């Protein structure tokens, strides 16, 4: 099986892509994105922001993405197995977030929003993939917001893409201007995204069916957007 680095380098003779592809810490496959679409996206980001957006620091505490299976199991099958393994009700709505557990990722906002969402529905669960120095504080924050029973801490997992395929919504509260590898993968497999409205995220969420971007300065809007998306 060919590595992501070799695949990208073989696809394009593009200096930035080759730089990204040879960064060992870059855990994204984007294997289902059309090659031309990925090239256009990277070229646009290169022109607007430059290659510094592709930071290697964010990879700490995040598993390497396995190459997506060319013939993945049906979503319903993946979902049923996952719910059974996690001991969750079959009617659960699954939100998922991927990333190192650090303050810069602003994951606190997800727990606050989950608390607000739980006022109107009790079937939502948040899957947290990743680990990091902020985990203990975040677990405490989840308890303070009375949503600890709605959060599943998965830590480092072997195949994050399986969780994304089984989920209903990808959520990110990271307000920074940087390319999110997890958002790229969510977009690639057709998982709707709710994230902050940043220049880089606008290049990923480009149509209504891709999800919704939220004003990062308006905390309540994030919870409201989650509610409207799940109830549309």
Image (tube, rainbow, N blue to C red):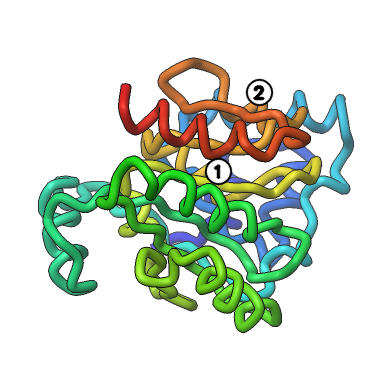
147 or 26, which is in the foreground? 147
Give the quarter of the figure containing the C terminus. Answer: top left
Judged from the image, the secondary structure of the residue bearing numbered disc 2 is helix
Which of the numbered marks, if any, corresponds to residue 62? none
* Number of callouts: 2
- The relative height of residue 51 versus residue 49 in the rendered view (above or below) is below
| Of pointers 2 and 1, the one earlier in the residue sequence | 2
Where is mark 2, residue-wise? 40
Residue appearing at x 48%, y 77% in the figure: 156
- Side (left or right) of 183 relative to 19: left
Residue appearing at x 78%, y 35% in the figure: 217
Where is mark 1, residue-wise? 183
Residue appearing at x 48%, y 46% in the figure: 116
* Residue 166 in view in this figure: no
- The relative height of residue 203 versus residue 118 in the rendered view (above or below) is above
87 or 48, which is in the foreground? 87
Classify residue 102 by image quadrant.
bottom right
In the image, residue 47 lies at what x, y percent? 86, 25
- The relative height of residue 34 versus residue 142 in the rendered view (above or below) is above
């Amino acid at each position: 099986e060919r590595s992501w680095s070799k695949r990208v380098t073989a696809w394009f003779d593009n200096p930035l892509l080759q730089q990204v592809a040879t960064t060992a810490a870059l855990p994204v496959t984007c294997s289902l994105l059309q090659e031309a679409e990925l090239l256009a996206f990277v070229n646009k980001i290169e022109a607007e922001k430059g290659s510094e957006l592709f930071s290697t620091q964010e990879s700490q505490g995040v598993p390497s993405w396995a190459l997506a299976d060319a013939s993945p199991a049906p979503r319903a099958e993946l979902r049923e197995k996952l719910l059974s393994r996690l001991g969750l009700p079959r009617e659960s709505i699954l939100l998922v977030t991927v990333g190192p557990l650090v303050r810069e990722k602003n994951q606190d906002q997800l727990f606050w929003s989950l608390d607000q969402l739980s006022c109107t529905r009790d079937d939502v669960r948040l899957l947290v993939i990743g680990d990091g120095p902020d985990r203990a504080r975040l677990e405490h924050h989840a308890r303070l917001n009375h949503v600890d029973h709605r959060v599943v801490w998965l830590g480092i997992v072997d195949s994050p893409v399986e969780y994304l395929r089984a989920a209903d919504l990808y959520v990110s509260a990271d307000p920074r201007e940087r390319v999110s590898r997890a958002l790229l993968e969510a977009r690639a497999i057709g998982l709707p995204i709710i994230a902050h409205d940043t220049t880089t995220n606008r290049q990923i969420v480009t149509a209504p069916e891709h999800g919704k971007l939220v004003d990062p300065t308006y905390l309540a809007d994030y919870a409201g957007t989650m509610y409207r998306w799940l109830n549309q």
